[in-house]
Amino acid sequence: MNRRRDLAAAGVAIIVIVSIGALVIAAVLDAQHAGRRRLGQLQVAQIQQLARSMDTRVNQAYDGFQGLVSGHYHATLRDPADAARLHQLQALNPKATTGYLIVDRNGTIVNGTLLRDPNLIGTKLSRPGLEQVLQGKPAFLDVASGATTALPTIALGYPLKTKAGVPYGAFLAEVEVSPTAQFNQEVAPLAGKQHAEFAFIDRAGNVIASNQANSIGHPLNQPVGKSGYGLFRTHGEVAVVEPVASAGWRAVFFQPRKNFEGSLTSPLRSALVYIALLTILVAGLAAGLLLRRLSRAREEQRRLNQISVEREEFISIVSHELRTPVSGLLGFLQTTLDHWDDLEGPERRRAVSRAWANASRLYSLSRDVLDSSSLETGHLTYHREVIDLGEVVSTTATAARELAPERTIVLDGPDEPVWIDGDPDRLQQVLNNLLDNAVKSSPPDGPIEIRLSSEGSAARLSVHDSGPGLSPDDLDRAFDKFVRGRGRRTVGTGLGLFISRQIVEAHGGTITGDNAPGGGAVFTVEFPMAPAPARPVGS
Amino acid sequence: MTTQAVARGDDRRVRPAVTVVIADNDEAILELVLLDLQLEGYNVLATATSGEAAAELCAQLHPDALVVDQRMPPGPSGLETIERVRAEGTAGVCILYTNYRSAQLQIATKRLGATFVEKGPLQTLRAALQRRFPASETPPRA
């Protein structure tokens, strides 16, 4: 349940962080969209400017030809005056590769300069747009083979009119359409270093001028709508189309989208990738940290609950265990008093002896409780000196025998002293605890054996009982607080071995519990030996 | 498990009309109750240190009263022992003699028709037995 709650909290954290990340990404995408729109507007403005500029130049050309042409040509077959005028005009630009033509009202070539074939005079000129000029409107004729050059040409057509304004023919100035043409030289530099195409196309979609040399004179190979102007985005390219109204041309711009928007979108795309990665990373970290903190909090809560349970158990055990010797003490005294006269001497002695044993047990229990409290607060004090551990063991064993005369307690120790640096009272307390446990665990007729030896630099004390031995759980937890061993069969606060271990470790020693090879349990305590005092105790 | 047949040598204090079985895992308390009830004139037939042994003794001896401790690990508790003895009808009066001051335990004891007696002063246990076995029903003390 708690795990599910932790996961839910982590999930919410991930959702919040991912939402924030998504909002940031949305804001960046919005900025990117706005940037792209602005970029498009700028490009449209540039092409519009280009188209307007061209429109102005075309109109200027029309105006210039008006003065040059009006009233000066007869437009009759091989008219010598017309021929002379055309040659004068041609002579103004000796490097020109294209010439001029005069056609009559039927479109028949009647005069011309730089004609690629003199026989063209008298033949009908067939060029798209010529009809419009013959009807009285100046125009640029679409790309077609020229009469004055083999190269593709466009032609500026200007109508010849009578004073009354009636068209009777046309003056045509062919202009070469090629990469080296002067007009193209003006368009070619527009792209600069960009990977883009700037071009002018005629009504039919033929390229008049372009910075892409191979497309000049040919139909434009880009899918640009024949109607409609402005910005177009295809899957891979951006196109801008603007009209040059006076000539019927269109100014066009093409560029692959990645080049057109690259400078804007590349950093933004990188930013988006970084933001997405950062979001995932932060969300993952946040979720991980949250889970860890929640897990720690739960662990702390469990620990506190465990402490609380242990405290309650402690109070329950202690109150019960204290009441038991109190009941015994009161009971034996009461029955002795109530039946003083009925009891015989040995019975009276035994009852009082039982009362004393219960009082001793009460004292031991209260000392265990107080010692446990002192151990927790670090206030357990030791009065250490160099002592003969054999003497402490012997005294304790004698007292135990007196307390339980029906028990067989055997002591096997060396004759020479076993010197250690220790607090005799506390060491006696340890041995008492071990003996008390051994008595509780052993059957009434089972012997208890105490062995003391010195091995190298260590003093070893062991207590063997004749009980059922230690279970795996006992082996694991025997020295923990409140653990009452041997499957909880024994009585007590469960503090004895806990306190014993603390005392032994405070003396720099170790205490272990194990099952003896021949049956029963054996608890072994080892202390570091101390050098014999200069004047041995008791000497 | 420890059971023992009990017989005090001194006939002056034996009142064989009321027979008792005592069970407690604390040997000191067991000895105390045994001594006091014998001195009070009851005929303590046997003692046990586990609930299971106590129930078996009741089945064999059919005492007038069973005095049993509550907590006797690892075997059945005093209450469980009383339940079994009640079901088998092998003891007259059942007394739960315990250090536990639990209202829940008291209620459960009462439901089984047994008497709850808290360990402490011996008068409480004596009074509980005397209520069920008034002095007129017991032979006068010698």
Image (cartoon, coloured by chain):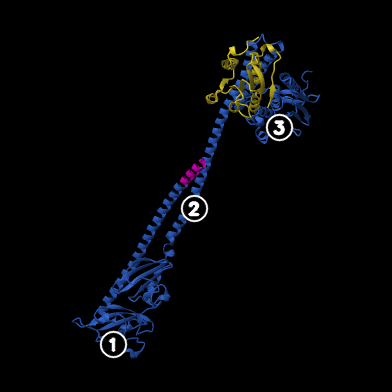
Chain colours: A blue, B yellow
- Point out the residue furthest to the right here: A415
Dot 2 amino acid type: Leu
**Between marks 2 and 1, how big is the CA–CA gap?**
74 Å
Q: Which circle's residue, 3 or 2, is located before the other in the chain? A: 2
Label 3 belongs to which residue?
A469
Q: What secondary structure characterizes most of the magenta part?
A: helix
Label 1 belongs to which residue?
A108
- The residue lying toward the viewer, choosing from A230 and A302, is A302
**Mark 2 residue element:** helix
Q: Quadrant of the C terminus of chain A?
A: top right
Is residue B55 shown in magenta? Answer: no
Region in magenta: A1-13
Question: Does residue A293 appear anywhere in the picture?
Answer: no
Q: What residue lies at 50% left-to-right and 44% top-to-bottom?
A: A7
Please state the chain letter of the residue tagged with numbered disc 2 in the rendered image.
A
Image location (x, y in percent) of residue B70 = 60, 25
In the image: residue A112, left or right of residue A275: left
**Mark 1 residue element:** loop
Label 2 belongs to which residue?
A277
Please state the chain letter of the residue tagged with numbered disc 3 in the rendered image.
A
